[in-house]
Image (cartoon, rainbow, N blue to C red):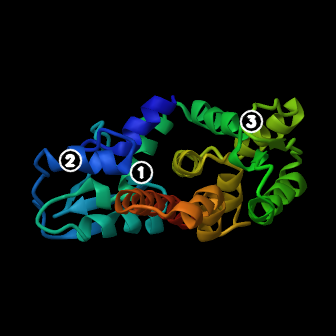
Amino acid sequence: MRDILEDLEAGLYLSDPDPIRRAQIQSKMPLPKRFYAEVSVGERDVGYAILLDGKPVRTPGRALLILPTERVARLVADEFAAQKSEIDPVTMPVTRIANSAVDGVTKEPQAVAEDIVKYSGTDLLLYRAGSPQALVERQAGAWDPVLDWVRREIGARFILAEGVMHVAQPAESIEAVRRHLGGRTEPLRLAAMHVMTTLTGSALLALAVEAGALDVDAAWDAAHVDEDWNIEQWGTDAEAQARRAFRKADMIAAANLIAALR
């Protein structure tokens, strides 16, 4: 299921989950020309459609792209309206998530939820540095409040590990995460949560953002505590910065989509 979702999230013209690699591949193939003048949102019996010159948009799987709220539909419509002479899927992260929800998650929502559950068993927030002390404290400051929220609101207590050696988590904690996700079966919500989980390596950060307990910028910073520490020590390069910017745009799109579902 994870491979299928990565393909769907990438979209019809994006053939690699890494945003820099996607851009490199895409640069070698022609982008479709913008063929429409007007973008609008039309109400349907079961939701809202995106209309290009009055004609409804379809997903890469050829399904009608019908969205559950007008706010979500307008997020997608804004991405279509922002296209210039060509349609560049790299600049349309909400549309890509919506496509993955319609073409993939709708068919197997439980499998997607279970993939998020699996991440919680090896969650980024559970594996801590033993040194230096400044990094230890930085991890604790960013990650402990999220674990406190998970324990308080979801009823899941996790075991912290030092280093990268796998530590099996309590079965009851994994089950608590599974129950929590059981109340979040909307395909778009699950698709967005899956995107946030895979981008950060943390299901727990995704759960906190979805619940409104953590804003997306704080979650993104928390997911990059180790990377930011290394940058401070050794510096970075332009390609790494571009990759991170692409990924953050996808993270923000997922959070915006969830907010638009409320």
Whole-percent x, y for residue 94 in the image: 41, 58
Q: CA distance from mark 3 to mark 1?
A: 27 Å
* Rendered view: 245 above or below 159: below
Per the image, the residue denoted by label 3 is: 121
Q: Secondary structure at mark 3?
A: helix
Would residue 44 appear left or right of 52 to someone viewing this image?
Answer: right
Q: Quadrant of the C terminus?
A: bottom right
**Disc on the earlier residue, 3 or 2:** 2
Mark drawn on residue 209: none
Whole-percent x, y for residue 215 in the image: 64, 69
Q: CA distance from mark 3 to mark 2?
A: 35 Å
**Disc on the earlier residue, 3 or 1:** 1
- Observer able to see residue 71: yes
- Number of dots carrying numbers: 3
Would residue 180 appear left or right of 20 to someone viewing this image?
Answer: right
Q: Secondary structure at mark 2?
A: helix
Q: Which amino acid is tagged 3?
A: Gly
Query: Residue shown at 13%/63% (left/top)?
Result: 36
Whole-percent x, y for residue 104 in the image: 44, 35
**33 or 198, nearer to the observer:** 198
Per the image, the residue denoted by label 1 is: 98
Corner quadrant of residue 244:
bottom left
Query: Residue shown at 41%/51% (left/top)?
Result: 98
Corner quadrant of residue 37:
bottom left
Per the image, the residue denoted by label 2 is: 26
Q: Secondary structure at mark 1?
A: helix
